[in-house]
Amino acid sequence: MSQSKATPKFVLEGVRARYDSVEVLTGVDLEIPPGIFVIVGPSGSGKSTLLRLLNRLLSPTAGKILYEDKPIEQYPVLQLRRRVGMVFQKPVLFDGTVADNIRFANESLDDDRIAELLAQVGLPTDYAHRDSTQLSVGEAQRVCLARTLATQPDVILLDEPTSALDPTATKTIEDLMISLAKNEGISLVWVTHQMEQAIRLAADGAMLYQGKIHWRGNTADLMNADDEVVRKFVRGELK
């Protein structure tokens, strides 16, 4: 018996988006499946814009976005953002303790659940009482992940979350997210400009260039693509 194809998490059809008078996405057609999906491309190609459309931090100027077969605008915004969490390039924490920051996502969390979330992101449970301003960048990014996990999301959007981290902290975050995808069934949509990271993270991905999907397939195949734009990106000639 043939196995049925998994329903895409997101489907984008003819999606356009602009900032002021600049059109950043110029007609994106893309299916994003469950699991880990990476989006690569040079700066200014529209990667972050596309990610922000997926939990309605931005709205498209044209086209259609479906989340689990339903038009994305039919979900109440707050409900959608609990199901589709986001982790940004630079960790954003508020004044107060680590526990205060995690409870910002879900104020009903008790101390035991805070401890579970900290353990889930690889931090000691006593970090709950630490001042958020005293954390390293890597620790702060893990607290942001814990805060995102507090809403029990179905999908996590990651906008270059390791770009400010050293190699050790980067590996910690990568291993953590891969584990969450494998063991918790959370889907990841990960934006990166690093080819090596894209290949480490996933077999499935797409390349954005000048506001359009320029390539779609297995990330390992990017290294040997015939397309000259893809080859320039892989060689580091497109930043």
Image (cartoon, grey):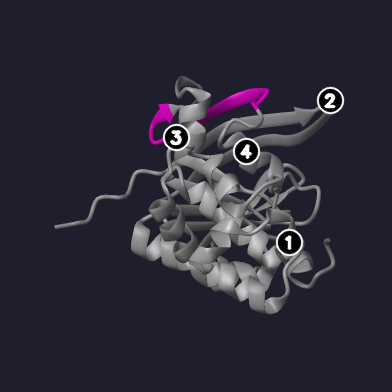
Task: Name the secondary structure under disc 1.
Answer: helix
Nearer to us: label 3 or label 1? 1
Q: Where's the C terminus, which quadrant? A: bottom right
Q: Are marks 4 and 1 in contact (CB under 8 Å)?
A: no
Nearer to us: label 4 or label 3? 3
Nearer to us: label 4 or label 1? 1
- Nearest to the observer: residue 136 or residue 64: 136
Residue 28: assigned label: 4
Residue 27: assigned label: none
Span of residues in magenta? 59-70
C-alpha span from label 2 to label 1: 37 Å
Q: Are marks 2 and 3 in contact (CB under 8 Å)?
A: no
Name the residue carrying label 2: 20
C-alpha span from label 4 to label 1: 41 Å
Q: Where's the N terminus, which quadrant? A: bottom left
Q: Tag 3 or tag 4, which sits nearer the N-term?
A: 4
Residue drawn at x 49%, y 37% as measured from the top left:
107
Name the residue carrying label 3: 67
- Nearest to the observer: residue 29 or residue 111: 111
